[in-house]
Image: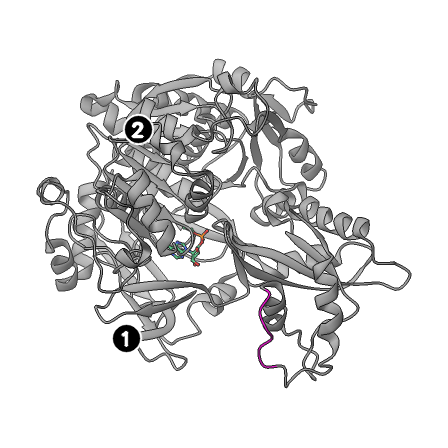
Amino acid sequence: MSEPTIEDYYHEERTFQPSAEFVAAANAGDRSLYDEANTDLAAFWARQAREFVTWFRDFDTPLEWNLPDAKWFVGGTLNVSYNCLDRHVDAGLGERVAFHWEGEPGDTRTITYAELLDSVARFANGLKSLGVRRGDRVAIYMPMIPELPMAMLACARLGAAHSVIFGGFSPDSIRDRVNDAEAVCVITADAGYRRGAPSALKENVDEALADCPSVTSVVVVNRCDTEVTMAEGRDHWYHDLVAAASADCPPEHMDSEDLLYLLYTSGTTAKPKGIMHTTGGYLTQVAFTHHYTFDLKADRDVYWCAADCGWVTGHSYIVYGPLANAATSVMYEGTPDTPRAEFRAGARGEWPKDRFWDIIERYGVTQLYTAPTAIRTFMKWGADEPARHDLSTLRVLGTVGEPINPEAWMWYHAHIGGGTCPIVDTWWQTETGGHMIAPLPGVVSTKPGSATFALPGIGVEVVDDHGVPVKHGGGYLTLTQPWPAMLRGIWGDPDRYRATYWSEYEGRYFAGDGAKVDEDGYLWLLGRVDDVMNVSGHRISTTEVESALVDHPAVAEAAVVGATDETTGQAIVGYVILRGGHDASDALGEEIRQHVAKKLGPIARPKQVVLVPDLPKTRSGKIMRRLLRDVAEGRTLGDTTTLADPNVFDEIRRRAAGASGED
Ligand code: WTA
């Protein structure tokens, strides 16, 4: 059979149907969930809340809605860690594997639900012995090891909110997040494995904590056996803490609206937002969507979400959704291009780039959930890599984090999904907590590149500049009604919450994404419409990078744009004007580039820094980023009539061609 071509797929009218066999066995094989939700929204979610969650006390009212404040399942009490652990063990599932964990060097651990409960209870008691209490905040800065979900669940058990900080963030980022949340404790590790070598974490925490007065204790997991400094009285080894702790830790009874966690994400200003998620509604929606979007059969599936717990995808679809559903998951510490130990002796380049496919084959993975940027990287490495492995256990493939281009969708479908697995393209955000737009794989026919329709119980409309719904065509994505896992606010900043999300279009949540609706009503996501970049599925604000650039002593002014990039979706390009007395050189450009990595973390390092004599500005002094994007993407310039000095571009172009950066 010849390879399918783009033309075979990339037609709005071209759709993929799930097989009759898939539909017959699907968790949702007809439209009844949509019908039920359309009939009575609150009753629909109330039913899901009682089906997916075990309540200590049943709730009285499903929803109280006073825009922009929602309360879901009012009066109910529950504990999220009890729902993820105890109830499964009580139901006789203690021996079921919760995590098949694989470290980057190839070490493995198999953790059952009974073992996970034991570890979490001890961890919770250990935290208690350090003074962590219900209502506190705990920061977590860890590699992808089992102690990371354990730490999250231990906090949930005590009723302390966690704030997970992605391991790629810098000491400055840790400091800002810890201080904003006034965290009392930080949980970390000496280091984590990253591309074959330990990457230090504790050192970054030490640097950050020089300026964090609220923190009284630090817990350190020994992952890599690297040398660390332990501050007497403040720092504690995890293994000592749990060895001394009892495995009996009754879960706190939390109110449905109590804070479960904070997760900081980039907005359009330099200050990250602490997104607030609570317990009852959040758990209901992540368990519901995990069950239906991935068509989970908990007693036989081996589900793998290849994200990092430092992002919301890891929170909802590695930890809380799968564990609430008693799923068996794979968890992997490293990067897709780190080879197995047996290959590492060879020279780089000779290594097979098949770590993912090897993992899928060995564990018999049934669902794979990853990002388009990873899929495009796999495409570059070639179809031979997956072809050497038996991937026939896969049933459903998922994508998240950015729009998926039809070519990548097709490649994923053909080479990973064997031409038969439904692909669920899931649109959602840190703020939404769980999936919002995605196909139910047994119900909705898919189109390559479209996230299809709102899930049952979710209201989505695309509107024009005036907030009027668009029947067909392009506009802005809005959400028309509250949903259980919605953010409850921005930590410490209720005004910013209302202004950012609920003020742009009256009565609607503004997502910050552009979208179009096709003739069949399918939704196509078109990327961010604000100053937020999406680099490899990670949200980074242009303002954040600009302030890191101007923080360098040689920089007078900076403008940052996200330029379209074949692999990472967008790439960060910084245009910089130097202060007097500094001469432009490659070395200085590189130094400034590295300065951003130091300030914000390596994920925010610009791909290119261009040192320019001037920036394109309007006569009122506003930087015209649109034109800089044209330059970065090698296009002819758009409308330049509002430019104060139209000649500024000749020099910018010349400098861009020779600027320092990657590759
Ligand atoms: C983008 C990640 C198109 C979007 C879960 C959104 C997507 C932002 C998709 C949220 C998708 C996420 N198709 N775009 N399937 N999923 N996005 O908060 O721009 O890290 O606003 O949450 O990612 O990113 P966040």
Residue furthest to the right: 581
Image location (x, y in percent) of residue 204? 66, 35
Q: Neighbour class for label 1 at 10 Å: few (<14), some, many (≥20)?
A: some
Q: Dot 1 corresponds to which residue?
A: 472
Q: Give the structural element (helix, strand or loop) at label 2.
A: helix
Hey, what amino acid is under mark 1?
Answer: His
Residues rendered magenta in the picture:
634-639
Image point 18% across, 44% down: which residue? 50
Q: Dot 2 corresponds to which residue?
A: 85
Q: Give the structural element (helix, strand or loop) at label 1.
A: loop
Is residue 457 at all visible to an observer of this figure? yes
Q: Neighbour class for label 2 at 10 Å: few (<14), some, many (≥20)?
A: many
Give how far apart the Cα atoms at labels 1 and 2 are. Answer: 45 Å
Colour mapping used in the image: one colour
Q: Quick one: 252 or 625, which is closer to the camera?
A: 625
View quadrant of ligand 1: bottom left
Image location (x, y in percent) of residue 267? 53, 60
Q: Is residue 273 above or below residue 398?
A: below
Q: Is residue 496 above or below residue 377?
A: below
Image location (x, y in percent) of residue 250? 34, 27
Image location (x, y in percent) of residue 552? 78, 54
Marks 1 and 2 in Cβ contact (< 8 Å): no
